[in-house]
Image (cartoon, grey):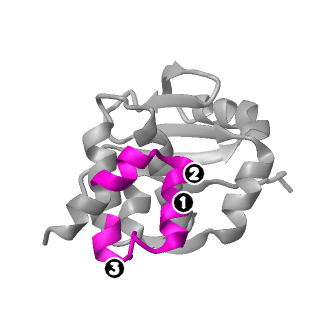
Amino acid sequence: MARQDPGLRFLIIGGYAVAAHGHTRATFDVDFLARRSDRPEWLHRSRNADLQLLGESNAFAQFTQPTGGDGLDLMFVEDPTFEGLWLESVEREFGSLRARVPSLNHLLALKLHVLKQGLAHRTSRDAEDIEMLARRNRLDLSAPSYQNLFLKHGTPEIYDTLLRILRKP
């Protein structure tokens, strides 16, 4: 009997997770969040799947398919961070597959963390994701819990800007 490889736990983040929480938008890759301790195995399996490494840093690895198609972006976090996100994650359907995505609040925190970095190529998309997630899920961002979330993972300026945007229909 052949030995079966154990599965690696991951959460779908990025555009597919945003869609899973109510806001569908175009995306050209699949984003996974995984434990940093699993990084060597993720890199090994990605290469064995004939994905080509485009770039990597301590926290990320980005792959493309040699024949075209969607790419794969891997974000690595410390194990305790991953476990906290996993515990509150929710299962969603993606076509005929089921996978886990961060809870809405954790997804907002991830988006705020990126938005706070002020990366020009991400700012517009992440701000729109936060706005649309708030609208589609009818979130009252003036509630203390959301104010705390925004101030912990974002900035006062981001929080104030989104409050102003959400006042408009």
Instruction: Classify the position of the N terminus by image quarter.
Output: bottom right
Can I make out residue 84 in this image?
yes
Q: Is residue 109 above or below residue 102?
A: above
Which residue occupies the extreme left position in the image? 169
Left or right: 62 as drawn, with respect to 47: left
Q: Secondary structure at mark 1?
A: helix
- Image point (24%, 52%), residue name: 26
- Image point (76%, 57%), residue name: 83
Residue corresponding to mark 2: 152
**Do the CB atoms of the residues marked 2 and 1 lie less than 8 Å apart?**
yes
Question: How far apart are the alpha carbons under marks 1 and 3?
Answer: 16 Å
Crowd rating for badge 1 (residues with CA inside 10 Å; few <14, some 14–19, many 20+): some
**Residue 152 place in picture, x, y as percent:** 57, 51
Residue corresponding to mark 3: 138
Question: How far apart are the alpha carbons under marks 2 and 3?
Answer: 21 Å
Q: Quadrant of residue 25?
A: bottom left
What secondary structure characterizes most of the magenta part?
Answer: helix
Q: Amino acid at mark 1?
A: Leu
Instruction: Classify the position of the C terminus by image quarter.
Output: bottom left
Q: Which residues are magenta?
A: 133-161
Q: Amino acid at mark 2?
A: Lys
Q: Amino acid at mark 3?
A: Arg
Q: Is residue 164 above or below residue 116?
A: below
Residue corresponding to mark 1: 149
**Residue 155 place in picture, x, y as percent:** 46, 45
